[in-house]
Amino acid sequence: MKKTLLTLLLCTLASWASAGNLTVSVIDKEGKPVADAVVVVIPANKTVLPKIALPPEASITQEKMQFLPAVTLVPVGAKVRFINNDAWDHHVRSSPAGMGQFNASNAGFELRLEGKSEGKPAKPTDIRLDKAGVMGATLMGCFIHGSMRGYVYASESPWASKTSAEGLAIFEDLPDGAAQIRVWQADQLLDLAPQQATVGATLSKSVVQLSVVPRRRRL
């Protein structure tokens, strides 16, 4: 028993010692930082997992004719709860993000959410994202209100993050060695080529530039 615990401790210490950090900066065509881009890192060493995993559940609220948050990042298999806080109904339909439009043949799921009655709680509806789909991203819209757009990205890699307002995605305790970086952004319709990075004892930094300037989000 003691030998087993010692072996486990040594393996844990070895994994910590071989862990590195990676910062990915996403900028637009004009060199400005891009928020809410999804950065996925795929280490060559797939035996090490993040200390903090992607949440297995997420909530998307419909409020003031918007999906909040506009971009939701979850792992494949996650449960997503939709909550309509508007007083009117919303009809949600999904499609692979690259399709650009909704139709019966490519819709991943379809929901009709009743409007919230005054003084009563909203009625949530849950779905489970069992597949990553095309590039992992799903476009959501409302047939009743055509201006509404939202996105869900289901990542097959546990190493995934949304960029901050400064356009940064920071990964800690990545396994040492080669890694592939993929970036998805809602307005970047042409797939960006994956970047290669090497993670080691020193901080690794990568910059990914979009070929577009993202549209300003309606507030």
Image (spheres, rainbow, N blue to C red):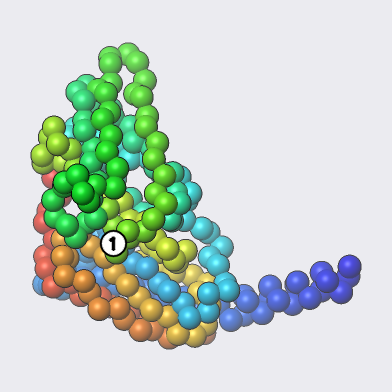
Residue 168 appearing in the image: no
The amino acid type, in three-letter code, at marker 1 is Val
Judge by depth and name the residue closer to the eye, 143 or 104.
104
User: Which quadrant of the view contains residue 147?
Assistant: top left
Q: Is residue 8 left or right of residue 76?
A: right
Residue 93 screen position, x and y as percent: 23, 41
Q: Judging from the image, what secondary structure is the residue with disc 1 in?
A: helix
- Residue at position x 43%, y 55% in the image: 76
> With 25 as the anchor, is 2 left or right in this view?
right
For image coordinates 74% across by 77% down, the residue present is 10
Check the picture and name the quadrant holding the N terminus. Answer: bottom right
Instruction: Name the quadrant containing residue 212.
Output: bottom left
Residue labelled with disc 1: 134
- Residue 189: x %, y % from top left: 15, 65
Give the residue at the far front of this rendering: 105
Q: Does residue 198 appear left or right of residue 211 in this picture?
A: right
Residue 128 vs 75, above or below: the answer is: above
Residue 217, compared with residue 204, is above or below; it is above
Image spot of residue 153 (x, y percent): 33, 56
| Residue 11 visible in this rendered orientation of the protein | yes
The residue under the point 29% across, 47% down is: 108
Give the vertical position of 205 relative to 71 (above or below): below
| Residue that lies at the very extreme toward the top in this rendered image | 119
Using the image as rendered, state which of residue 38 and residue 169 is in the foreground: 38
For image coordinates 16% across by 47% down, the residue present is 102
